[in-house]
Amino acid sequence: MNVTDLFQDQIPLLRPWTGEEEVRAAAEVILSGWISQGPKVAEFETAVAGYVGARFGVATNACTTALHLTLHLSGVGPGDDVVMPSHTCMATANAVHHAGGRPVFADIDPRTYNLDPECAAAAITPRTKAILVVHQIGLAADMEPFAALAASRGLALIEDGACSLGARSRGRRVGGIAAPTCFSFHPRKMITTGEGGMITTNDEALAAKARTLRATGASISDLERHKAKGVLVQKYGEVGYNYRLTDIQAAIGLVQMRKLDAMVEQRTAQARRYDAALAGLDEVEPPYVPPYATHAYSSYLIRLRAGARLDRDALLRRMAERGISCRSGIQPLHQEPFYEARYSGVHFPASEEAARATMFLPIFPGLTEEQQERVIAELRSALGR
Ligand SMILES: *Cc1c(COP(=O)(O)O)cnc(C)c1O
């Protein structure tokens, strides 16, 4: 059965925008004789770094591993605390553990769903080593208060831009704003390479160390050795990892980068259509975009206002019954079983309210106006009075 048959009459929550161009790019690499990390990875790094306005890009096999390297190279190790939002993907916190640190959660701004600077400041302990800001669901956070906070307290600052490639804050693209930033190329994100990640940074030493650590700790890369016609021999000065992206993935990523602006445009047009339709539905609060930021709309998150006819879970079920795939909003980490036992008694009202009352609507390049009309009509008939 063809994959598209699975989607007949169904409106999926998301779908990657990949086609013949990606197939050809991957096939070329497969036939080239150089399949793992090599020239295409280098080209992809230059493309992403150039796009976001950072000096360096270091590709990895996921955002989780990009975050691990960045945390480690920012000095986070055993005994260190990292202040970060509870309202994020488990992967963000996993990376802190991989580096040996401990996540210390803080609450979000209920309007932007991004980390609240005052909550972050209040969460700082004598053991805090870093602040990890997440640009959540496509909306760029304001980095100015975090940069000031990190500078005044002598802390490292790291950005998780996993789902926000293409968004801007105060005119600058996520990845080129304030600190080393990690991206994901999982199919749920703005562009995809199947799996994949990247660090963008202006810090030359951090980039160089990340390049070494991602590839077994070797002092020179396979590509450098190849260019030197085999006369260079790598040395191992430390314990490294295998976090390499392949050239097959990077070739796909290069095609995706050429489509990125068009994808942001399509998503933005779809968001405007939802915004306009939902303005007439009192029960629903559309996403808020503060004046300093742009939204890349990797997701379209709505909040059900108190007193809506259906609660969020009932609405999700009803949409699913009608063939429209939506999903509940982000569930805060402090309520996940792993942390519940370890962080008992902590409460983050804005994160908890977002978990209860928010849900994602379908948004992706290729979603048609007719499909959006169906989503809107179902919301109206479910919630309208
Ligand atoms: C998806 C995501 C990650 C993890 O990315 P992977 O590439 O799957 O490791 C981390 N942080 C955020 C905010 C994400 O959305």
Image (cartoon, grey):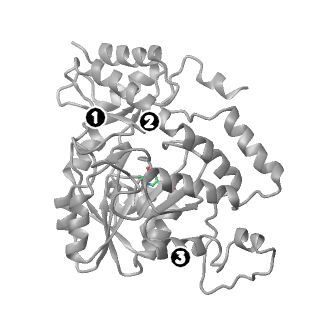
Read off the residue under disc 3.
209
Q: CA distance from mark 1 to mark 2?
A: 16 Å
Q: Is residue 212 visible?
A: yes
- Disc 1 or disc 2, which is closer to the eye? 2
Mark 2 residue element: helix
Q: Which residue type does callout 2 highlight? A: Val
Q: Which residue type does callout 3 highlight? A: Lys
Q: Which residue type does callout 1 highlight? A: Pro
**Label total for image:** 3
Percent coordinates x, y for residue 266 in the rendering? 45, 28
Q: Quadrant of residue 105?
A: bottom left
Q: Earlier in the sequence, mark 2 or mark 3?
A: 3
Q: Is residue 13 left or right of residue 340?
A: right
Residue drawn at (54%, 56%) of the image: 197
Percent coordinates x, y for residue 135 in the rendering? 35, 51
Q: Earlier in the sequence, mark 1 or mark 3?
A: 3
